[in-house]
Amino acid sequence: LSTDEIVQISDDIDNFISSNISNDVKIESSGLMIMLRDFVSLVISSSINSIAVSIIAIFIIALIFFRGFTWGLMAIIPLTSAVILNFGLMGIFGVRLSHLTALLTSIIIGVGVDFAVHYISSFRRHLKNGKDREKITLAVMDDVGYPIALDVISNMGFAALLFSDLIPLNYMGGLMIFAMLSTSFGTFLLMGTTIEILRHRINFK
């Protein structure tokens, strides 16, 4: 049964009990289905909270490591944009927020922070080496663009899971592919563009 069906059936059982059995008799539903219903609810709520806490923690770590508030904000741009895109596209394509999809969304956090750190580290290294500020973005792309793109392409192997007969594996394959594409998109286009725009207004160090 799907997650939605489990919740619906367990709710129907509880409604039937409350409507047709005397209040003098205390009855509680139990079994694997009830455990799964409560488990799904717990995992979804805790996963959403953990994603928010993870983004805040990464911001603080990046702020301390790169010694700059602006760099901390830059580091979470790919993560935040990827998470928003993930939940948005899930809604558009009708993918339900279940315990599986909630857990797999955390993959985006691990993937996205790597790309952001590589990009920012390369940018700061070129700054310290006195690279021409007008050419620094091109130098960063030459430095880390190919490795990041290669990482994304190599992980396209998860596409094989899309052909599995098990729906959870289909979700896993699809979300892994999306995580790689969305975080690289967030790193190159959103974060890279933001840094390029702010480069003319803020004295990055």
Image (cartoon, rainbow, N blue to C red):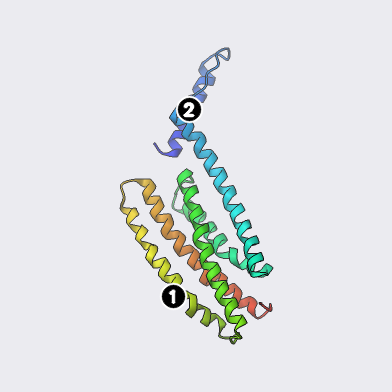
The correct choice, above or below, for 27 with respect to 161 in the image is above
In the image, which disc is placed on residue 109? Answer: none
Q: Residue 190, position in %: x, y? A: 55, 69
The correct choice, above or below, for 136 with respect to 165 in the image is below
Residue 87 is left or right of residue 127, and the answer is left
Q: CA distance from mark 2 to mark 1?
A: 54 Å
The correct choice, above or below, for 185 with respect to 34 in the image is below
Residue at (49%, 78%) from the top-left corner? Answer: 143
162 or 19, nearer to the observer: 162
Q: Residue 23, position in %: x, y? A: 58, 15
Residue at (47%, 52%) from the top-left corner? Answer: 90
Residue at (62%, 77%) from the top-left corner? Answer: 197
Residue at (52%, 18%) from the top-left corner? Answer: 27
Local crowd size for mark 1, using a 10 Å CA cut-off: few (<14), some (14–19), many (≥20): few
Query: In front: mark 2 or mark 1?
Result: 1
Q: Secondary structure at mark 1?
A: helix
Q: Which residue is mark 1?
A: 146
Q: Amino acid at mark 1?
A: Tyr
Which quadrant of the figure contains the C terminus? Answer: bottom right
Earlier in the chain: of badge 2 and badge 1, it is 2
56 or 102, nearer to the observer: 56
In the image, which disc is placed on residue 12? Answer: 2
Q: Residue 115, position in %: x, y? A: 51, 67
